[in-house]
Image: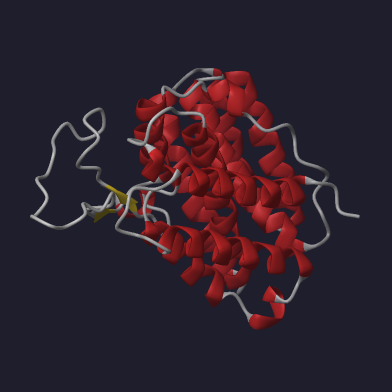
């Protein structure tokens, strides 16, 4: 796998007991509870959604978000929304919806302009829109990942490390909103662990957020992000070696969903 395709953090589990995902079962040692998370591998957002989609037989079009509000002058909010739009582009890619992709692509252009990235990133975003129009889906998947990494590089060149971290935070919050929504509607227990991928996923999100400057983290919206990450991580670490409960999945969907709604609302 090309290194630059990987998000700055990406960790998700290999599932031993879920035949539809891994196709094999590990035998537990006598007297021990089998952990639902047996290993961690690096995965891109596209790979995360591939696993989730197969397990949940996802109907991606039902998960599309409506257009976001006009970009905020609060750069931290705009960075979070831009990250969630990158996640949205992966979701739309899964659906193979060229018109919706172009709509999302245009919103990304607007948010990039707000962050001072419009001129430098515009050619790439325009090329992505053209790929979607021509339904060059295979090439577009790699292009989305490379465009994400270029945004990170440009922000770091501008010495905006906080915004680079917030873009990734917004991306993975949106992915967890989708995963928790899908898993909450599934019967049985086999796929509940897919709600978060793995506890490592949550820890990496916390680690990233903690690298944001303290001054930036004091903003009201980021205080909500911090609280949601802490509460979600605590929920899933209470009994990490037991099968996730339906309650944990529902609480995660509520916490992340409420946070995403606040992020997506027009700033008051």
Q: Quadrant of the C terminus?
A: bottom right
Q: Quadrant of residue 190?
A: top left
Q: Nearer the viewer, residue 240 or 117?
A: 240
What percent of the width, then of the height, locates residue 62? 60, 23
Q: Viewed as shown, does residue 236 lie left or right of 19?
A: right
Question: Colour mode?
Answer: secondary structure
Q: Give coordinates of residue 143: x percent, y percent.
A: 45, 39
The image quarter containing residue 192 is top left
Residue 5 or residue 250, whichever sits in front:
250
Residue drawn 25% across the image and 53% down it: 35
Q: Residue furthest bottom?
A: 214
Q: Residue 168 appears at what percent x and percent y?
A: 53, 57
Residue, far right = 268
251 on left or right of 69: left
Query: For residue 219, what is the image quadrant?
Result: bottom right
Q: Is residue 220 above or below residue 240?
A: below
Is residue 162 in sight in this rendering?
A: yes
Q: Nearer the viewer, residue 49 or 28?
A: 28
Q: What's the residue at 50%, 32% (across, down)?
A: 182
Q: Report the side of 189 relative to 117 (left or right).
A: left
User: 243 or 20, which is in the foreground?
Assistant: 243
Residue drawn 45% across the image and 60% down it: 202
In this view, 146 is above or below 8:
above
Horizontal and vertical percent for residue 78?
A: 73, 55
């Amino acid at each position: 796998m090309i290194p630059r395709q990987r998000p700055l953090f990406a960790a998700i589990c290999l599932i031993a007991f879920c035949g539809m995902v891994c196709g094999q079962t590990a035998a537990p040692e006598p007297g021990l509870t089998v952990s639902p998370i047996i290993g961690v591998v690096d995965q891109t957002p596209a790979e995360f959604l591939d696993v989730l989609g197969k397990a949940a037989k996802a109907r991606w079009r039902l998960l599309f978000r409506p257009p976001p509000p006009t970009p905020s002058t609060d750069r931290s909010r705009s960075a979070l929304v831009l990250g969630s739009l990158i996640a949205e582009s992966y979701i739309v890619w899964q659906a193979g919806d060229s018109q919706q992709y172009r709509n999302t692509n245009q919103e990304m252009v607007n948010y990039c302009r707000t962050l001072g990235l419009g001129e430098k990133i515009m050619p790439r975003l325009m090329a992505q829109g053209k790929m979607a129009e021509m339904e060059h889906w295979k090439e577009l998947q790699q292009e989305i990942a490379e465009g994400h990494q270029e945004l990170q590089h440009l922000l770091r060149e501008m010495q905006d490390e906080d915004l680079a971290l917030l873009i990734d935070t917004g991306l993975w919050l949106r992915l967890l909103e989708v995963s928790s929504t899908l898993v909450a509607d599934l019967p049985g227990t086999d796929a509940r662990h897919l709600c978060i991928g793995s506890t490592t996923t949550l820890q990496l999100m916390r680690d990233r957020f903690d690298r944001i400057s303290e001054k930036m983290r004091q903003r009201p919206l980021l205080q909500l992000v911090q609280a949601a990450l802490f509460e979600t991580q605590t929920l899933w670490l209470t009994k990490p070696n037991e099968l996730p409960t339906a309650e944990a999945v529902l609480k995660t969907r509520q916490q992340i969903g409420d946070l995403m709604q606040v992020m997506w609302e027009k700033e008051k």
